[in-house]
Amino acid sequence: MRVIDSHTEGEPTRVIVEGGPDLGTGPLAERRARFARDFDHVRRFSMNEPRGFDALVGALLVPPHDPTCAVGIIFFNNVGFLGMCGHGTIGAAVTLGHMGRIGLGTHRFETPVGIVSVTLESRTRASVENVPARVFRRGVTVEVAGVGPVTGDVAWGGNWFFLVDGAPAPLELGFRRQLTAHAEAIRAALVREGVTGEGGAEIDHIELFGPPATAEGDSRNFVLCPGGEYDRSPCGTGTSAKLACLAAAGKLAPGALWVQESVVGSHFTARYRLDADGAVIPTISGRAFVTAEATLLTDPDDPFPHGLG
Ligand code: PYC
């Protein structure tokens, strides 16, 4: 399997460019289901130790179902599959540019949750106009074990998020274990109290917000991902969900700039527009850097041919 690795504002992406599973044709949501049902060992092989690690997000390039798209992408991680992935889309765009498969300019990428419009602005910078983001429930309070009541918003930005203002420690790398434990306790409380996204969808990302660390920033965040790791970037789908919350609260006007800092000190710039139906359409911009071109190997004598986990 040939892969190209990159990081987007600190968060890693591994694009499978050759040797991935043949998922056939059809809508991407169906092909993602086929991937999960028949080829989960490929996800584990490429994501888990010893070839990967828990923060890694994978991106399988597939022929698009919609012929207006340059490519189809299915995102996955150490525990399963994602709807969309903002940092991963920026990483994939820079990777496709690195491979010479796309040039500077705007391209449509198809994902299991819809088509996104991606502009490769330079060799290392891309912006993504995401699928519509929306708030599902505002001001939901759950009782978090060892903490007490915590209030947040449930919103969609391509994945489901619970967004909380405030954290028990500074949003800095040195406090990541404490922040992770806090966010995991919130996620457990959501499950225990039956708080979900629309249609009973699991809320698998928790986003904690605090004040920015720089004069340019509007806010800093810590995002717990489904597999227990934190997002090194400010999280593209999480920032999209944040924009939907800000728009719903009347705190950010269409077109206004929002600078979202991550826990590692990187940032995404973000804005939204309203479409004809009044839906929030976020655009997230950031940098990505190619870090490796590799061939992943397996050995018939390897006791862990599909990795650990
Ligand atoms: O950037 O959307 C994102 C993302 C989701 C999970 C990790 N990064």
Image: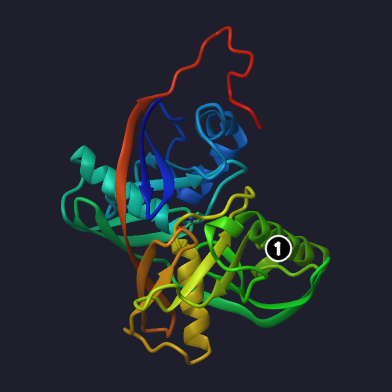
Q: Residue furthest front?
A: 174
**Residue 30 appears at what percent x and percent y?**
52, 47
Q: Is residue 170 left or right of residue 142?
A: left
Helix, strand or loop at disc 1?
helix
Does residue 153 appear anywhere in the picture?
yes
Question: Foreground residue, 280 or 58?
Answer: 58
Quarter assignment of residue 95: top left
Quadrant of the image occupied by residue 214? bottom left
Q: Nearer the viewer, residue 283 or 251?
A: 251
Residue at (64% x, 71% y) in the render: 167
Q: For this rendering, which residue is in front, 266 or 118? A: 266
Question: In this figure, which colouring scheme has been used for the structure?
Answer: rainbow
Relative image position of residue 79 (x, y in whole percent): 62, 43
Task: Give the left or right position of residue 242, taking residue 96 as reference.
Answer: right
Can you identify the residue that label 1 sits on?
182
Can you say whether 221 is above or below 97 in the image?
A: below
Residue under the point 54% across and 34% down? 43
* Number of residues whose C-alpha sits closer than 10 Å to that of mark 1, classed few (under 14), some (14–19) or many (20 or more): many
What residue is rendered at 51% in x and 72% in y? 241
Q: Is residue 99 above or below residue 174?
A: above
Number of numbered callouts drawn? 1
Compared with 218, 81 (above or below) is: above
Q: Give the farthest residue toward the top.
A: 301
Amino acid identity at mark 1: His
Residue in the picture at 64% in, 14% down? 303
The part of the image, by quadrant, that contains residue 187 is: bottom right
Point out residue 190 in the picture as x, y percentages from the top left corner.
Answer: 75, 66
Mark 1 beta carbon near ligand 1 (under 8 Å): no
Residue 202 is at least partly visible in this image: no
Rendered-image quadrant of the C terminus: top right
Q: Is residue 115 left or right of residue 150?
A: left
